[in-house]
Image (cartoon, rainbow, N blue to C red):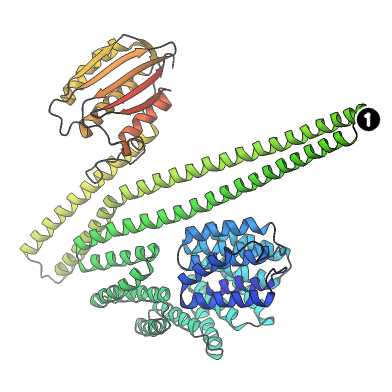
Amino acid sequence: MIARLMLVLVLLYSGSAVAIGENEFDALRHSLRDLFSHSPLEAVTEVKAQLGAPEGQFSVDQQVQLLNYQAWFLAELDQLEEAIITLARMKELLSEASDPFLNYAYHNLTAYTFEKAGLYEQSLQSHQQALALARESDRPRFVHQSQNNIAGLYLELGRCAEAATLLQGYLTYLQTHPDPLSQSIALINMIRAAICQNQLQVARTLLIDAQAIQKKHQLKQYLLRTMKLQGELQMRSGELAKAQASFEEALQGFAGEELKDPMLETLFLLIELHLTKSELTQANNRLVQARPLLESLQSERLWLRYYQLQRHLAEVNGEYQQALAASDAVAVANKNVMARQNSINLAFVMAQIDLADREAQIVRMKGELALEEAEDRAFRIEVGIGAIAVLLLLSLSWWYIASIRRKKDKLTMALHELRETQRHLVESEKIAALSTLVVGLAHQLNTPLGSITTSVSCFDNQLDMLKTQFDAKKISIKQMQDFLHQSREICMVIQKSTGRVVEMVEKFKAISASMEKSEPEALQLKAFLGKKIPLIEDYSKVPILLQGEDVQVVTFPDTLLKVIYLLVENAMEHAFADTEAPQICIRLSQDDRWVYLEFRDNGCGVAKEHQSKIFTPFYTSKLGQGKLGLGLNVIYNSVFHILTGRIEHKGQEAGMVFEIRLPKHS
């Protein structure tokens, strides 16, 4: 990954027109890189200050290069959303740059930013765009470097055979164009591909070649990474003692170089090794050692792996309470990873939309300027050749018609761009809504499923212990009784969690408002509700007052009754907790097109800041109390999609009012 960024920066030496001297700008680039190696935050501040210099101090190409540095520094600091916004500014300037190959740096750095967020598919798309540019420019070095980057992503995605094919082509190219650093990186990726495909002997041969190059050219960091891979290979081969020695040597080296990410990766591998060898105390010590590193990096993806290992250790130790707590932490970490990825995706989409809007604004301004210039020319012509009025009139008439046509064409184009921008905004809102739904589903289902998994694991451990005692003929009646008691408790946990999952799935289905849709019927609404409301009162124990005129409507009676029942149930659960004399009032009215049903309660009401969210799926004021936050969303979908009506809420100082508007003829 570091070598990939170094290649991007090599491109920055190819700038063309300069505003400050070329040597002076080279010195600025070197100073920024040196500053970043000592103080990343100061480097970001300095590059922002340079970009804020007076207009004309830097050429367009130089501004693109400075934005490239800023985006790189931000990505390294894990400020990925701001890095995406900086890349959008860089893309905006690229259309004016004199060196078209600077686009390669943009796509390469965009891919790196997505890769840091774990968005490998998006990263792959950007690398493929960079590869296409390298091929169009006929630059073999960058073609093969892009293929090496794509191979690294293939390894992350489990596409190991495809990765091996690309890497073999890159290594063949490096035989005729030697570069020790590039050869070292390519061999490391090739070893990973061989291990992934279980080609262990091939991996050993490649490992020897890589270590020879790294030792000869003193590539210490990459020699340490190869040592870590050697441990993985030994662990895969069952040479556990050798694997532990390799991991510990790599860990010590990474610590000396202050490379925190590979230190954590090596610690996680050591924990897995200790668990394989049933060295539980050592595994726990390694977890304790890893935590300060995690807290200094604050990486959601690394926290997720840490809690997964913590849960595994607790399960092996038989510490089931700790295992359940770790399962909850895994769920939270997984939610944080997804939320971060969604945030970065949304930042990218919004940056692209903002860029398109600015481009459209520039086009409009140019059009207005052209129109003003044309009008000014027309005025000068009219004053200058007033003596030939007839000819001038004909000329101006022709020109004015042409000008109107041009303006119409520009306005048509602007309208098209506006609609495209609007469509992108709608799509981005859909992405945000879908992300919220997916995160909500995952969060709600993860806890009961985690409990089931942990309970099954506990039962399996207890069963293994009982079998061991039975085979040794050492089982006692008390041990058997303890086993039966623990098994009954585990079964109760599984039954409770399974029931919770089933209940959640049934409520999730209700989001689509897929209630049975019978044929619409003509109803005298007040008479119909007058027969049904006593049944609801018997269930709710809350008096319901029916008022208004008896209106006629053609609608789906079962769905309408279900909506009223759910509104009553919602009021019982949320409105009447502290109300001494709860009461509900339903008032009917109509106009020429609509029938209005007003549902009013005298409960506690909803705070203003929460009223805009009440129809949102998974929003509830009783989170963690068994409520999913789906009731009002089901009501909304039923009214909107089945009854083809509308529903609105009106907050009061006391109580809540829902107004349902139904068409008279469904």
Residue 463: x and y, percent? 19, 62
Of 317 and 617, nearer the camera is 617
Residue depicted at 45% across the width and 78% down the height: 229
300 w.r.t. 225: above or below: above
The quadrant in which residue 414 appears is top right
Residue 456: x and y, percent? 24, 57
Residue depicted at 48% across the width and 70% down the height: 196
Residue 519 appears left or right of 468: right
The quadrant in which residue 124 appears is bottom right
Residue 432 appears left or right of 18: left
Q: Which residue is mark 1?
A: 388
Of 255 and 171, nearer the camera is 255
Helix, strand or loop under label 1: loop
Residue 443: x and y, percent? 33, 50
The quadrant in which residue 255 appears is bottom left
Evaluate whether residue 14 shows in this view. yes
Residue 508 appears left or right of 41: left
Q: Residue furthest bottom?
A: 216
Mark 1 surroundings within 10 Å by alpha-carbon count, few (fewer than 14), some (14 through 19), many (20 or more): few
Evaluate whether residue 131 shows in this view. no
Residue 233 appears left or right of 129: left
Residue depicted at 45% across the width and 56% down the height: 341
Q: Amino acid at mark 1?
A: Ile
